[in-house]
Amino acid sequence: MDIVIATLNQNKLKEFKALLEDFTATIISLRDFPQCPPLVEDGSSFYENALKKATNVARYTGKLTIADDSGLEVEALGGRPGVYSSRFSGENATDEENNARLLRELHGVPFDKRGARFRCVLVVAKPEGETAFVEGECKGIIIDEPRGHFGFGYDPLFLVPEYNKTFSEIRPEEKNRISHRARALQKLLKLLPNYL
């Protein structure tokens, strides 16, 4: 059986494949459906964006689809960048540009006020329209300069206190046990058999 991951992001797809490796399904992505209409993330919440992606792709492909919307919420910034995490510095911003803007906005904010969390909402959708969702989060602190060479996005700035390492310093297999996406997916794995 195929499960479509509603993403073109290769880093995200790699995480999903690793997290679903024990699941008996073939994991494919939007790269396998180049004619699929573009997905516009214009929702006001992670849930709205994930639901829209999952239902549209499931309907288009005729296959069970998992979509996520996730991002970084920083306390000192009132929860921003939130749903705008991937485009914090503009529509086609690079990870480096987004990280640079985050550091600019946090300039002068003391370490103890830099609490943050990565949040992930996963939606599974059948082509017929039935859906379910789960959430996961991982709490951390935003540091002053990037550290590490694993990961992507805000990972080099996101310090996980229990490890005293950033997500970019934690090996991918370890991150895939503690990340927001991993925690959401653990919950989703309990629901998936009902959708197969």
Image (tube, rainbow, N blue to C red):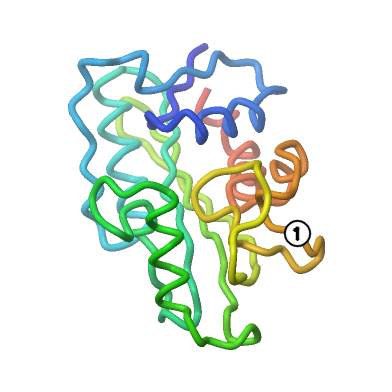
Indicate whether 118 appears above or below 57: below
Q: What element carries label 1?
A: strand
State the image quarter where residue 137 is shown. bottom right
The residue closer to the viewer here, 10 or 108, is: 108
The residue closer to the viewer here, 40 or 86, is: 86
Kindly identify the amino acid type of the residue bearing the numbered disc 1: Lys
Residue shown at 31% from the left, 17% from the top: 62
- Where is residue 117? Give x, y as percent: 57, 67
- Residue 92 is left or right of residue 64, and the answer is left
Q: Name the residue under label 1.
A: 165
- Residue 128 is left or right of residue 144, and the answer is left
Indicate whether 179 appears above or below 126: below
- Where is residue 83? Give x, y as percent: 35, 59
Residue shown at 64% from the left, 45% from the top: 182
State the image quarter where residue 61 is shown. top left
State the image quarter where residue 81 is shown. bottom left
Residue shown at 65% from the left, 86% from the top: 112
Packing grade of label 1 (10 A; few <14, some 14-19, many >=20) is some
